[in-house]
Amino acid sequence: MERRHVRRGDRRDLFLFEVTSVYPTERDNIEFAVLLRASEPPPAPQLTREIDRDLAREAGYAGEFGAGGFATALAADPDLQKRHTALKRRWREEADAERARVRGPWPVLDRKLHDADQ
């Protein structure tokens, strides 16, 4: 794994380890060492108001937001509600899949066996 991939995952808060030390390759050598410390998994992505409004537009809502306009439209139009719910479900599945993809095949360490602080 290239160092830039570790950094990219860490910037996105998806890397489940903290990089505590990096021992680079010596000239004409392909081995390197990285010392990792397990960290807590990041929280799941949150559906923000902005994302929800984009999903509402994609579902076909053309009205104004605020003052309960969208809630009223959902209550009055079961098809809009179904489309919006399906889009929110799809958004969650895609967000979770992206989170898992970027996280990579990192092992989950047993803290009893791998944590130097214990």
Image (cartoon, rainbow, N blue to C red):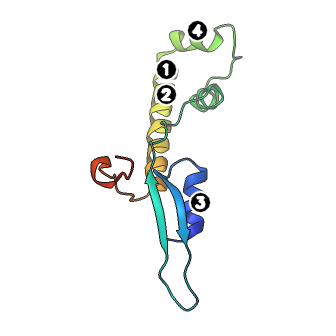
Within-10-Å neighbours for mark 4: few <14, some 14–19, many 20+? few
Marks 4 and 3: in contact by CB < 8 Å?
no
Of 99 and 117, nearer the camera is 117
Q: CA distance from mark 3 to mark 4?
A: 45 Å
Marks 2 and 1: in contact by CB < 8 Å?
yes
Marks 1 and 4: in contact by CB < 8 Å?
no
Q: Which mark is residue 81?
A: 1
Residue shown at the point (60%, 28%) measured from the top left:
48
Marks 2 and 4: in contact by CB < 8 Å?
no
Q: Earlier in the sequence, mark 3 or mark 2?
A: 3
Question: For numbered disc 2, what is the local secondary structure?
Answer: helix
Instruction: Give the residue type at disc 3.
Output: Arg
Within-10-Å neighbours for mark 2: few <14, some 14–19, many 20+? some
Question: For numbered disc 4, what is the local secondary structure?
Answer: helix
For disc 2, the marked residue is 83
> From what the image shows, is residue 116 above or below residue 6?
above
Instruction: Give the residue type at disc 2.
Output: Arg
For disc 4, the marked residue is 72
Relative placement, left or right, of 79 versus 64 is: left
Question: For numbered disc 3, what is the local secondary structure?
Answer: helix
Of 101 and 72, nearer the camera is 101
For disc 3, the marked residue is 7
x, y (%) of residue 112?
Answer: 28, 48
Q: Earlier in the sequence, mark 4 or mark 1?
A: 4
Q: How many marks?
A: 4
Q: Earlier in the sequence, mark 1 or mark 3?
A: 3
x, y (%) of residue 52?
Answer: 59, 27
